[in-house]
Image: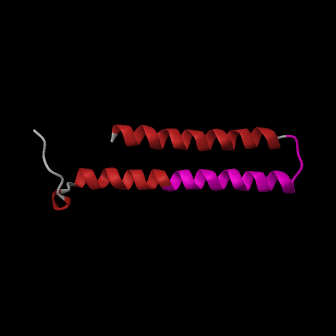
Amino acid sequence: MIESFDIFKTTLWDMAKVVVLLFLGMYIIFAGVVIKQVANMNETLDFGLGYAIKLVAIFHFCFAVFVFVFSFLIL
């Protein structure tokens, strides 16, 4: 059975899905800020772990995007 979309008939579960996706979207923004901060730190400080930390930050961002897309598909 196909029901028409009615904004006034949203359930608590539907609102929870939207809130989760909004928070995951904000987390993607946070992961992008982490990449920028790591880049600034690597410019300021010169030490041997700069490349490894940058790689971890990029992996963190990619994982955050993956979690957002996966949750968007599931929810």
Residue at x-position 25% and y-position 50%: 13
Residue at x-position 68% and y-position 50%: 35
Viewed as shown, does residue 23 lie left or right of 33? left
Residue 43: x and y in percent read 85, 54
Chain part drawn in magenta? 26-48
Q: Is residue 75 magenta?
A: no
Residue 74: x and y in percent read 35, 37
Quarter placement of the C terminus:
top left
On the image, which quarter does residue 64 sit in? top right
Q: Is residue 38 magenta?
A: yes
Residue 25: x and y in percent read 48, 53
Q: Along the line of sight, which residue is nearer the eye, 53 or 73?
A: 73
Identity of the residue furthest to the bottom in this view: 8
Identity of the residue furthest to the right in this view: 46
Quarter placement of the N terminus:
top left
In the image, is residue 19 above or below residue 57? below
Residue at x-position 82% and y-position 51%: 42
Residue 41: x and y in percent read 79, 54
